[in-house]
Amino acid sequence: MNTQRPRIIIIGAGFGGLFAARTLANQPVDVLLIDRSNFHTFTPLLYQVATCALDPSEIAYPVRTIFRKNRNIRTLLGTVTDIDYANQVVMVENGRQRLQESYDYLILATGSVPTYFGKDVFREHALELRTLNDAINLRNHILELFEQATWIEDEAAREAMTTIVVVGGGPTGLETAGAIYELYNHVLNREYLHRNLQTRVVLVEMQPYLLAPYPEKLRQAALEQLRSLGVEALLGSPVQTVDEHQVVLADGAVIPTYTLVWAAGVKGSPLAEMLNLPLQRGGRLPILPTTEVSDRPGVYAVGDMTYLEDESGQPYPMVIPVAQQQGELAAQNILAEINGREKRPFRYHDRGSMATIGRRRAVAWIYNKVQLRGYLAWLAWLALHLVTLLGFRNRLNVFVNWVWNYFTYDRSVRIILEQGRGEEVISKKRLEIGD
Amino acid sequence: MNTQRPRIIIIGAGFGGLFAARTLANQPVDVLLIDRSNFHTFTPLLYQVATCALDPSEIAYPVRTIFRKNRNIRTLLGTVTDIDYANQVVMVENGRQRLQESYDYLILATGSVPTYFGKDVFREHALELRTLNDAINLRNHILELFEQATWIEDEAAREAMTTIVVVGGGPTGLETAGAIYELYNHVLNREYLHRNLQTRVVLVEMQPYLLAPYPEKLRQAALEQLRSLGVEALLGSPVQTVDEHQVVLADGAVIPTYTLVWAAGVKGSPLAEMLNLPLQRGGRLPILPTTEVSDRPGVYAVGDMTYLEDESGQPYPMVIPVAQQQGELAAQNILAEINGREKRPFRYHDRGSMATIGRRRAVAWIYNKVQLRGYLAWLAWLALHLVTLLGFRNRLNVFVNWVWNYFTYDRSVRIILEQGRGEEVISKKRLEIGD
């Protein structure tokens, strides 16, 4: 390896980091891609893992495999514990080892984490859907509750066990609520026959409408499709209190449940705090239009964790296409700087957005002009996600599973992986390596 | 449900319990099938999950789905804590609930657990391969070590991280050693290029030969195929001591390693102790030829956990076909007893055995007469396992994965599922339900 080449560290192998690394592949730079997982997660389909439709590995792709053919990209499985921006060094924990990796350029791309808008006490009783592990936890939780509900005598407790509350009327909330409704009513109900289980899926949104950024007609179409499916949508009232067996809304509604899925919003990744700069609202790190961070030489940041306003003064949304495009731009601007060319400012190419609500139900807002709803929107969603999934084999397996699910409503991926029992063994096997 | 019908409880949804339940499906009895997992595991392919070739759900099939169409079979996800054989009641933990289920007939089919032959201290540093969770743990362990090995400076520690010791020269040991060798040398070596990683796979067997029950020629063929693949086979010396970073054999050989897979032997499931009867060697529960347990009215036991001698005075082996055939017989004999017919004694239909050692390498001993080795034996193994896997969709996916792996050596199922992090959330979400 030529040690004279500029050394670029990318933290985070989500969509922003991945697209930055792709842009730097086979360029005359040395890239180090650091992530806490050894795989990239196709987050738009997390809810399908949570609802037993897909296997975890079908939406996860090993980072090493993605860059197998790019000798200038190395990957490091580890947790960044500190950034010494004065000396341009990143501190990383890799197993029991502590590594210090120096950089000429640094790209931060660690995304976002769920926010409870100051009510962190809700988190204690909430399940999230941001990581692959979250999805497996939610799947285990739902299946375990059904197994217990079958055997409990207390009717009220039984109903609470088969009631799920999803908080958040954005795409994730809609997709999750719709998919869980279908799991309950087309899959699980065929197998839990000995006891008549009443299921209930409730979507809670504090605004009086769903899908805030969408035009009114699509918001309304989404609400109608959700309700026609069978999901209860409670709009216009925020969550007031949460405890282990119920959710209470500000308007007084009480929903007995053991399952609260929090999809109400996200804030910037806490890693941004390592730069010791004032953050924008939502914990987002302000960046320049070139995706550079002011006063931190050589540091770029992209995606959900950043804050940048468009021409109209609105911040760019925390969505995947922004992260991808900013990731590419950061990489291009670093190459420009190395080669003495001019850096370009960020210009967002917005192809629109879509949200799906169960089979044959969706809304799509293409190029923020064409509005689709129902079957057509759903087919568009299906095609888009199949095309953008990484890896041919993954695509093939996902396709087989989808076709199978569509015609049979069968979901074999319904195993409770007992993560608890594993923990003991894993921690026992953690290595003791001399420092 | 007709409460007058005889009530049969089956404990364990392995091969013995599953075949017993299948035999009782749609008969005029009420069956309760209890297991700690909500799925049946196709254990012969566990090593393929451990070596990233298959997804966990591809060898696990939900018990509820298997018996979806059999209304007389109910399933209970729970742990049996006691058997009150005097009053014919089984105590079960299901989440926070404690259930008491009474039976007219009981079939015990809880299989076996690994044995360390009195050296239980080895277990602290060993990984096992009996459950789906074991397989995921081993996969995580291997992948994490590779990620760490890439970054460690100490050469000796690095080599120990990419060395694996498999103890046990039976089919499980051979299959695991062979599959890990291929994972190391055809998959991982293509992706860990920045550091030259020396890998080493060692199989340890205390007997001077592999595959003890096989004829001499096949034992020799297995050893030759294993060595021609690249696995080191150390025969004739038992493990003397094990600690975190090495394995020492009785003959003085020292193997620095962080990974010890224990496949040296199994003993009967500890559940047998709940009957308060003297056990045979290996903790196995003696049964009558009808699979009944003496002095415990209504209690039958089948499979690995039991001890029964054939005409020559040899105990039947702890293998899947014995469990399946005993499971069927126990169910048939219960039906015979109910209908006043005569019970039949166990007669083992031995179709032979086979073991695979990587691609195109295997030995097969069909009907204990025909001896196959190499490619032909491997094809026979492949066909048999594909046919006996449950569920059409599982078969299809496994087939796609196998063909894909065969031609490409690609293994996408290479994600480290961080079971540790999940545990916190899961335990937080365990239900508090009033007793």
Image: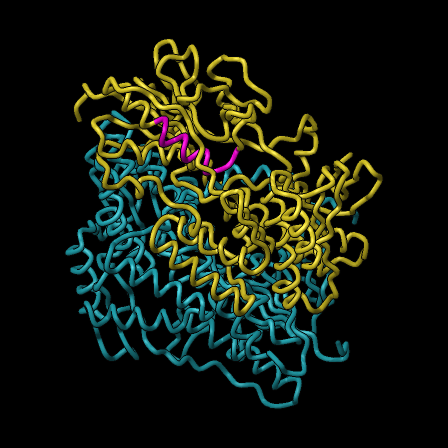
Chain colours: A cyan, B yellow
Q: Count all numbered tags in the image, as a single digit.
A: 0
Taking depth in this image into account, of A186 and B275 the one nearest to the observer is B275
Instruction: Locate residue A4 relative to residue A410 in the image: left or right.
Output: right
Taking depth in this image into account, of A13 and A384 the one nearest to the observer is A384
Q: Residue at x 64, y 62 (%)?
A: A76
Please determine whether, in this image, residue A47 is positioned above or below residue B314: below
Taking depth in this image into account, of A185 and A392 the one nearest to the observer is A392
Q: Position of residue A215 (x, y in %)?
A: 23, 71
Instruction: Locate residue A192 relative to residue A266 in the image: left or right.
Output: left
Where residue B19 sits, quadrant-wise, is top left
Please determine whether, in this image, residue A141 is positioned above or below residue A311: above
Check the picture and name the quadrant holding the N terminus of chain A.
bottom right
Magenta region, mostly helix, strand or loop?
helix
Q: Magenta residues?
A: B318-330
Q: In the current view of this chain or complex, which residue is farthest to the bottom?
A: A341
The magenta stretch spans residue A407: no
Q: Position of residue A198 (x, y in %)?
A: 20, 38
